[in-house]
Image (tube, grey):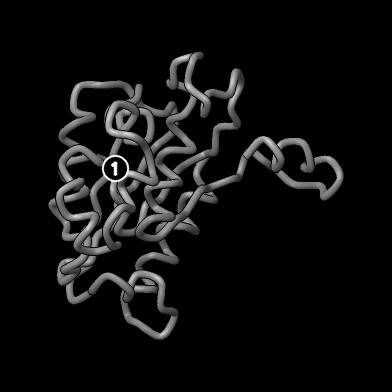
Amino acid sequence: MERLRDDAPKYHLDLSRTVLVGHSAGGHLALLAAARGGLPAASPLHVPSPFMPRAVISLAGVGDLKTFARFISLHCGDGILERLAPPDRLAEVSPATLPPPKTPVVMVSGVLDRLVPPYVARDYARARHGKAGSVRLVDIPGAGHFDLVAPSAPAWADVRHLIEAALEAP
C-alpha cells in the first residue's frame, strides 16, 4: 500500500479516489490493509503512517477470523490458519479485532454463497457495532461465491455499480 503512495507522483495517480476491492481471501486482505493503522507498534505488520483508501469493498471476505476460524481448514485446507498467524497473534490479522478503519467499508455477500455465507459479513459488522467508521451490508440475491467476480454473472453489474459509486463519492 505504501508503494502505491510512493509511486503516485510518477504515474500521476489520484490517491483520493483509491478504493480497495478484494474477493474472498482478497476481501479479508482489503479489510486488513485499511485497519492496520490500529495495529500495535510491536506488531511486525505495523506501519507508522499507513495509506488509507477512500473506501473498502469486501466481496465475500472474512472480516472476523475468530468466528470463521473453524471453517478455514474446511474451505482452504489444513494448516492455512496456522500459516496466516500463530494462535496468539490471530487478533493482529483479524480486521474485526482491530480498531476500525477511518474509511467506509462495504461487505458484499452472495445470498447463495456456501463458502462465505452472508452471516460472515454480519459477524464483522456486529463486531464493529458501536465503533467508529461505517459498515454497509449488501446482499446480492441469486449470487454464489464466484458470481461476485464473474463479469458474465448478473451479480457483477451490482458489484460494478458499488465500485463506481465508491470511486465517485466525495
Residue ID for mark 1: 63
Q: Is residue 54 above or below residue 150?
A: above
Q: Quadrant of the N terminus?
A: top right
| Position of residue 145 measured from the top left corner of the image (x, y, whole percent) | 27, 70
Callout 1 amino acid:
Gly
Q: What residue is at 50 percent from the left and 44 percent from the top? A: 169
Residue closer to the observer: 110 or 116: 116
Extreme-right residue of the structure: 10
Q: Quadrant of residue 24?
A: bottom left
Q: Secondary structure at mark 1?
A: loop
Residue 56 percent coordinates (x, y)? 44, 45
Residue sitting nearer the eye, 2 or 17: 2
State the residue at coordinates (37%, 38%): 85
Quadrant in which residue 123 is drawn: top left
- Residue at 29% across, 62% down: 76
Would you say 113 lies left or right of 56 here? left
Q: Is residue 50 above or below residue 61?
A: above
Q: Say above or below: 68 vs 145.
A: above
170 or 19: nearer the viewer: 19
Query: Would residue 155 be found to the left or right of residue 122 on screen?
Result: right
Q: Residue at x 60, y 18 (%)?
A: 48
Label tally: 1
